[in-house]
Amino acid sequence: MWYCACSVMGQTAPSQEPNCSLCNSSGLRLYFEKGRYKFYTCPQCGHCRVFPYPSPEETKAHYEQGFTESYLAQNAAWFEVLAKKRLQIVENYFGPGFRGSILDVGSGYGFFLREAKNAGWTVLGIESSPAEVDYSTKHLCLDVLNDDIQTAMSTLADSSFDVISFFHVLEHLEEPGQAILEARRVLKPGGLLILNSPNLDSAVFRILGSRWSWIYVPGHLQYFRVIPLSRWLQRNQLTLHLMETWTDAPNIYFMLEEAVLLTLADLFEWMVLPQKFGRRIKGFVYGPFHQQVVQDRLRKLYRLTPYLDRYIKSRSLGHEFLLLVSK
């Protein structure tokens, strides 16, 4: 699975009516419900958010349970793969000879920053998770600001970074619109802002709806649609250079399989006697490289749908998006 660097901004007390957390418009409409959480969409910009947000206690417990030594040990190899992919995005944009400064917002355990630092970039991270900050500063010897995103970014000077990256971070924030605008302030003229998150307009969401595994709270509070988001960015004086969604046919088949298995696991966990089977199923689904192994096994099925990838990408229906913009 794609790694989610989970930094959360300071929690706020819920109001009676939600405003859009991207464009701040009022008049949001109920879109769907999952468990005890409600999801609202903005009629102005199309953004979707949870309302009300989970309590600070729920959020803290969620991240403390997730970022453990065993989690790191199981996923370190995958984080290294992702780090190389992410640095390649940066270097493809600037060209092989350019080296500047990178701010990675929600830097997690620091694998991307280490990859960039080793390649000659000057790097700084922002991360609120103590366990991840401890690893990235002590084991990888990186500079990381240990604070919530809004507070940390407010301490940075205007036009001070060549690259600012949000790799699977915006969906975790309470006020992603504010975070993007603050990043615009800190970004150098002509610098690169990278936004990478799940895509609510994906084919997978259209098939699975709320059963999509990336629809979960308290982890994900925001749900972006790539085309409306790109328009909002341009309305806020950011120039769009690349908009694409990532997926392939085996990935869709994997997510369908994942939804079936997780539904089965929830059923087993609801029943008293077979609870251990539910836990084993979830352990299998969330195991390291599980997605890649299953995708490889689905190649034969993929050959039956040779035009599906082209259609998905042409309609921006991939399960996650990548936006490259500049100031």
Image: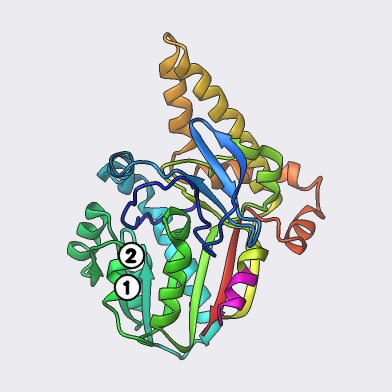
In this view of the protein, which residue sits in the foreground, 85 or 36?
36
The correct choice, above or below, for 125 with respect to 249 in the image is: below
Q: Position of residue 76 (x, y in %)?
A: 35, 53
Chief SS of the magenta region: helix
Disc 1 element: helix
Range shown magenta: 230-237
Mark 1 is surrounded, within 10 Å at the Cα level, by few (under 14), some (14 to 19) or many (20 or more) other residues, namely many
On the image, which quarter does residue 124 sit in? bottom left
Q: Which residue is mark 1?
A: 153
Magenta-colored stretch includes residue 146: no
Q: Which residue is mark 2?
A: 149
Q: Position of residue 42 (x, y in %)?
A: 61, 55
Q: Are marks 2 and 1 in contact (CB under 8 Å)?
A: yes
Quick check: can you spot residue 110? Answer: no
Residue pictured at 37% horizontal, 78% vertical: 102
On the image, which quarter does residue 187 sit in? bottom left
The correct choice, above or below, for 158 with respect to 124 in the image is: below
Does residue 112 appear left or right of residue 42 in this picture?
left
What amino acid does circle 2 point to? Ile
Disc 2 element: helix
Q: Position of residue 287 (x, y in %)?
A: 44, 39
Magenta-colored stretch includes residue 231: yes
In this view of the protein, which residue sits in the foreground, 69 or 259?
259
Residue pictured at 51% horizontal, 68% vertical: 195
